[in-house]
Image (spheres, grey):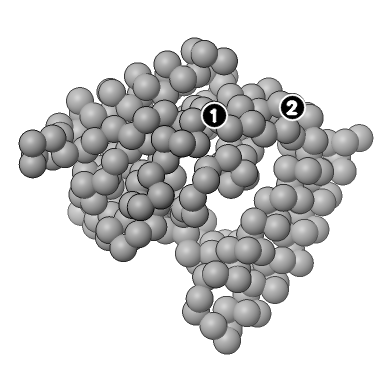
Amino acid sequence: MRGLFAVIVTISTFLVLAAIAITIGIFSKSTAFPRKLEKLWIWFVVKSGGLKIRTEGAENVPRDQAVVFACNHSSQLDIPVLYFALPVPFCFLVKKELFKIPLFGTTLRQMGHIPVNRSGGKAALKSLKKAAESIKKGTSIVVFPEGTRSPTGKLQEFKPGVIMIALFAESPVIPVAICGTYKALPKGKLLIKPTEITVKIGKPIDTVIDGKRRDKEELTKEIEKKVAELLCQD
């Protein structure tokens, strides 16, 4: 019954708040107020679902520069949970196809999230470089290097594609492990199960050493290892 209640609250509050955000967007291009509405919606999702979120390692996040947060991905709840857990503002990389969905896509645009082309080739590279420019301008970004949600909750192999954003921006990468969201809402399920969730934030990993960008494959492997180590402590 709690899970069904959470679904109803999630959908109804999204429709109302998205409509408000879009209306405001007609008169202003600022993302400040729409982002506040987004956080309010996330609050409804988390509280109605009975989720209790605890953060470890918030002191590892620099407050004076934008970073890339590299996180494991095992549930649709990972995104709202990160809003509660990460101590600085950030945006998500979102596959460009989602921006074409009526209402939802417009809302994503209003919130300032960044479309990414996942088709490969020059178009994909161009979208990654555009995302890197956002980091240079001071916007931290969350990426899920696994590429898709884990069907089992176990960590999947990281792909170097999105890690290229940090290399282009020459910004630190912070490994993040989200523990408990798979239990609360595994892939393929709709109803949220009240769960205690822990988000563990690791220390920054440099993308540039001695003035040179690191090898993307080597960097990706290191980030994957750090996230795995954080998960193993759960």
Q: Quick one: quadrant of the C terminus?
A: top right
Residue 20 in the image: x percent, y percent?
A: 70, 73
Q: Which quadrant of the view contains residue 205?
A: top left
Residue 5 in the image: x percent, y percent?
A: 87, 43
Which numbered disc covers residue 225? Answer: none
Q: Please name whichever residue, 93 or 206, is drawn nearer the observer in this view of the structure.
A: 206
Q: Which quadrant of the view contains residue 159?
A: top left
The residue depicted at 52 percent of the width and 45 percent of the height is 87
In the rendered view, would you say 93 is above or below 24? above
- The answer to whether residue 192 of the structure is visible from this angle is no
Q: Quick one: quadrant of the N terminus?
A: top right
Which numbered disc covers residue 56? Answer: 1
Residue 80 in the image: x percent, y percent?
A: 62, 45
Q: Please name whichever residue, 21 or 54, is drawn nearer the observer in this view of the structure.
A: 54
| Left or right: 209, with 100 as reference point | left
The residue depicted at 57 percent of the width and 19 percent of the height is 152
Amino acid marked by disc 1 = Glu
| Left or right: 203, with 55 as reference point | left
Outermost residue, bottom side: 27
Residue 120 in the image: x percent, y percent?
A: 27, 46
Outermost residue, top side: 232
Which numbered disc covers residue 195? Answer: 2
| Left or right: 5, with 13 as reference point | right
**For discs 2 and 1, the disc positioned in front in the rendered view:** 1
First in residue order: circle 2 vs circle 1: 1
| Left or right: 129, with 2 as reference point | left
Compute the Cα span from label 2 to label 1.
17 Å
Label 2 residue SS = loop
Amino acid marked by disc 2 = Thr
